Image (cartoon, rainbow, N blue to C red):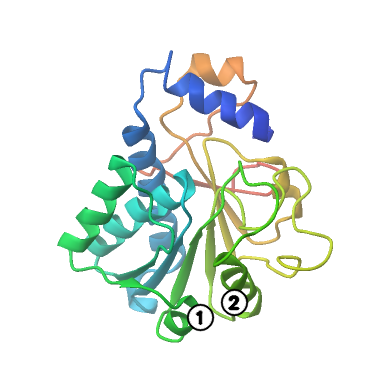
Amino acid sequence: MAIKTLSAKAAAALDKELMSTGAFSLDQLMELAGLAVSQVVYRVHPPNKGNRVLVACGPGNNGGDGLVAARHLRHYGYQPAIYYPKQSKNDLYQRLAKQLEDLEVPFVEDFPAAMKSTDHIVDAVFGFSFSGEIREPFPAVIRALEDTVLPVTSVDAPSSWNIETGPPESGLGSKFHPNFLISLTAPKPLVKYFKGRHFVGGRFVSPAIARKYDFEVPEYPGIDQIVEVGTGGEKL
């Protein structure tokens, strides 16, 4: 089943739609997104393959998804660590961080150093709304992601990639190709440049909203919040 992609503009409009006519709160959407991310990690890298997961979180909603994912991973038996250098003062993000602190999940300050003692990395730095220059302290994170041999799961978009045109042609981020990608709600155009295993997490989208934005909600098996699809959207 082919799944159409959503442009950055359409994805932003869809988020607003979900929180208006769809009657979802931001908290709910972030919880569902983070749950889906955690299920991808469990699928591709179960705890018996190494239970240390380093989650790199940006300052926006993508980072919030990473915080939620880390909480679920902790309950699955992983030992997550959080790199979250630009912590938001927003109440929602502060509550997500507090939940992790209560679970004794460590927050680390040196991302490249933390990579030396982890088994899997979750890239939740920049999402579909990213554009422009990568500001400090994130250039070092992108360079480390480019160079690592560790498996990386990116949330909605590999950080530094353009939502429409994929990886930069040169410079920072041009060599970053994560192993796994979870597209939230629906794939974005950048998936045609992605060569790894691709998942979609958007089981909560109603048929009416999917029709309005001209994409199909894939058939999610059982209780799964994710489904693996090809980069063209075909179900695997």
Inspect this view and state whether residue 133 appears.
yes
Q: Which residue is mark 2?
A: 144
| Whether label 1 touches label 2, CB < 8 Å | yes
Q: Which residue is mark 1?
A: 112
- Quadrant showing the N terminus: top right
Q: CA distance from mark 1 to mark 2?
A: 6 Å
**Residue at image point 38% right, 54% down:** 39
Total marks drawn? 2
Instruction: Give the class, few, some or many, for how many residues have Cα within 10 Å of label 2's Cα (few <14, many ≥20).
Output: some
Task: Look at label 2 and name its amino acid.
Answer: Ala
Instruction: Give the class, few, some or many, for how many residues have Cα within 10 Å of label 1's Cα (few <14, many ≥20).
Output: some
Badge number at residue 174:
none
Q: Quadrant of residue 41?
A: bottom left
Q: Secondary structure at mark 1?
A: helix
| Residue 87, placed above or below residue 45 | above
Q: Return the residue nearer the eye: 63 or 34.
A: 63
